DNA sequence: AGTAAGACTGTGACCGGTCACAGTCGTCCA
DNA sequence: TGGACGACTGTGACCGGTCACAGTCTTACT
């Protein structure tokens, strides 16, 4: 760890200090720093030694000011409820994003836009260009942040399909309909006849497309009377299960659009004196850490969170660079445990 | 939402654009922006109107460059394992920090230092002054980041007592020993005689001081043979419970230093054919979302996470400003549920 | 031999703020 | 009436990078 020998008044060494030590101009130092085309080997060598000697590090603010690029991206949360935060999968996503970002020499800043005041602040912040782009963690169709980002033409990549802005905002998403189809077919194969579904809110992609895939896979067997909507929370899952049981006591399987809702369904079923999976099979979605901890351990669809975060960062960088605006769909994996 | 009428070449309005519109100098605009002492009411009025008209927002990079302060703080994670991320309480802490930070007009950047490479990057990053201070989320005594931050004299506030740097790094922490004492006394009051403890690693404050408080409260009743160490994970809790049962089949209560370990203990107890709480009472620590979801719902000590994050940000701002370097201890609350 | 092209380098303007300084008023008091 | 002082304002240097431009020195080609 090189300690600056107080070259100037104890201040941090600048590009000009390095230039002096190396015996070149600050322009040459800048050239070495940025790829170093058109720099003689001797000059480069001298500069690199001078950098090591002085312990120079680039001042990102000066760099950002000069280039107009911030070299940082935002991880933007818009869910007003604490659902996302209660979900451990979210942490995986965040950590993955932080690591991918750091691996590219950029910085990840965390922004929360839960209420109107926060939303206004965030809008001003991103519009001012303090970040190069936004990783948008949102799900509700009515989310006003979508409109804001699009009209301000902020480079954005969404996690999950941004309803209402499907074509305008590139996104990384699991294959919602396909995953639901996989699970539905698995339940059918297991011999279940009366399969219910607890969906997510219909204004979220998970709520809409998982139901679509489910209905599609079941075909004639699909019965709308066996569908109830939750909000991804455990309580909502328990309540939805209750309603389903009240209406159709002959259900022999239930597919919840989140592990949390499946957990709620388990509680209701147990209270109703029904055994899982003997009387009613239960399947979830996400494979959050919760899934294997439940009793019985939950059969579910695993979302590839690490891959999702990695792809989001990669894609955002391409969008920022003015490149392609494609979207990416990843497969989910069926994880069979004891519950179904 | 004011739209800039392309005053200059479509670029973002600067302080000088505002000055032109307001008919004053850029120095006066700057004065208005920073508290506005020694500015005439007319000038201020003109400037404020000009700001509204042009849609001006401050360029934080230019500001940071000129002032030498970044106006942002880091949320630094050093845990190599994924324990923290698996724990939903962590998300609460993070969100709280993000909100407190935003509420003060600053930015929260997320840094992960899980391995040596990341650690080096992070060290360079903070040492370069890209953030004003660091919220340190760490727990292990041997964490090399502690030393780095102290020697580089980076303003830091730790979450939990930083072992080995207790006097040097201000911290916000729950009253570890006191909380453990509260729980131990509660278990005694419930009539339990043979109370075991599953501690956290002894190189973490939660591992050390919770055991201290527990032993202290039990006094003569304390039996070191009933203490086993875990690493806060569920599996480690299950294994520790197993060891305790093997050694002392007469335990009638167990206090785990985390809800996750308590969950593991529940599994082991159930496998051993023991009923909770009839045969063995189980208590946890944290009151993570998990606690009330367990079967039976877990009696535990609730950590005031929202308050902790809020206090951390407040304290860090004081440290950054060169102010007091006190530490803050907050009480935890006993939450009685069915497990004990 | 003359010139053009290429490799390399130094110079200085610029990004958008802040801040020290100097200057212009008006007011009040000796 | 003159000077001191306070309120307010404008000016320009500066923070630490980047980048366009001009200039020098080789080398190669006609």
Image (cartoon, coloured by chain):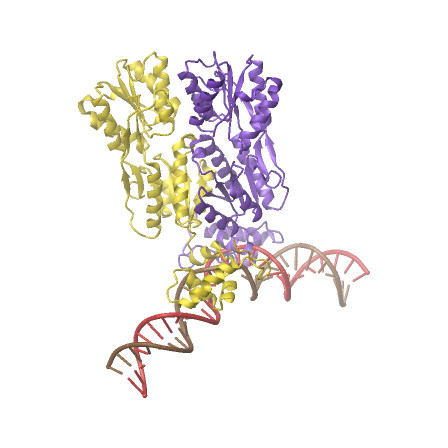
Chain colours: A yellow, B purple, C red, D brown
For the view shown, which residue lies furthest in the front direction? Answer: B247
Does residue B300 appear anywhere in the picture? no
In terms of depth relative to the viewer, which is nearer, A4 or B17? A4
- The image shows residue B275, relative to residue A301, as above or below, that is above
Left or right of residue A56, residue A36 in this image: left
Pinpoint residue B143: horizontal percent, then vertical percent: 51, 40
- The image shows residue B70, relative to residue B266, as above or below, that is below
In terms of depth relative to the viewer, which is nearer, B214 or B124? B214
For the view shown, which residue lies furthest in the left direction? Answer: A220
Left or right of residue A296, residue B251 in this image: right
Query: Which residue is at a point 44% across and 24% down the rendered structure image?
Result: B239
- The image shows residue D10, relative to residue A266, as above or below, that is below
Pinpoint residue B178: horizontal percent, then vertical percent: 60, 25
Query: Which residue is at a point 38% across and 60% down the rendered structure image?
Result: A35
Total tally of numbered discs in the picture? 0
Does residue B166 appear anywhere in the picture? yes
Pinpoint residue B132: horizontal percent, then vertical percent: 54, 47
Pinpoint residue A224: horizontal percent, then vertical percent: 24, 22
Query: Which residue is at a point 46% across and 21% down the rendered structure image?
Result: B243
């Amino acid at each position: 760890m090189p300690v600056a020998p107080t070259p100037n008044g104890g201040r941090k060494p600048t590009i000009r200090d390095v230039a002096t030590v190396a015996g070149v101009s600050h322009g040459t130092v800048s050239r070495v720093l940025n790829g170093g085309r058109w720099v003689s080997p001797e000059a480069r060598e001298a500069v690199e030694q001078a950098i090591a000697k002085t312990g120079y590090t680039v001042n990102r603010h000066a760099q950002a000011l000069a280039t107009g690029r911030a070299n940082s991206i935002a991880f933007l949360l818009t869910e007003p409820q604490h659902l996302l935060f209660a979900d451990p999968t979210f942490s995986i996503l965040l950590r993955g994003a932080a690591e991918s970002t750091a691996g590219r020499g950029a910085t990840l800043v965390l922004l929360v836009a839960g209420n109107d005041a926060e939303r206004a602040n965030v809008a001003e912040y991103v519009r001012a260009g303090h970040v190069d782009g936004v990783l948008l963690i949102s799900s509700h169709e009515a989310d006003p942040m979508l409109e804001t980002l699009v009209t301000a033409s902020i480079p954005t990549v969404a996690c999950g399909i941004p309803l209402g802005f499907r074509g305008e905002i590139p996104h990384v998403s699991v294959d919602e309909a396909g995953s639901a189809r996989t699970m539905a077919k698995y339940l059918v194969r297991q011999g279940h006849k009366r399969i219910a579904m607890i969906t997510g809110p219909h204004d979220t992609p998970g709520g809409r497309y998982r139901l679509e895939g489910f209905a599609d896979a079941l075909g004639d067997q699909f019965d709308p009377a066996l569908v109830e909507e939750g909000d991804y929370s455990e309580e909502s899952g328990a309540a939805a299960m209750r309603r389903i049981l009240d209406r159709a006591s002959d259900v022999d399987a239930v597919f919840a659009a989140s592990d949390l809702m499946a957990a709620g369904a388990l509680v209701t079923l147990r209270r109703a004196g029904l055994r899982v999976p003997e009387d009613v099979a239960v399947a979830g979605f996400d494979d959050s850490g919760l899934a294997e901890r439940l009793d019985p351990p939950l059969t579910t669809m695993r979302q590839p969170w690490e891959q999702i975060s990695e792809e989001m960062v990669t894609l955002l960088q391409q969008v920022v660079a003015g490149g392609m605006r494609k979207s990416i769909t990843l497969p989910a994996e069926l994880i069979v445990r004891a519950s179904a």
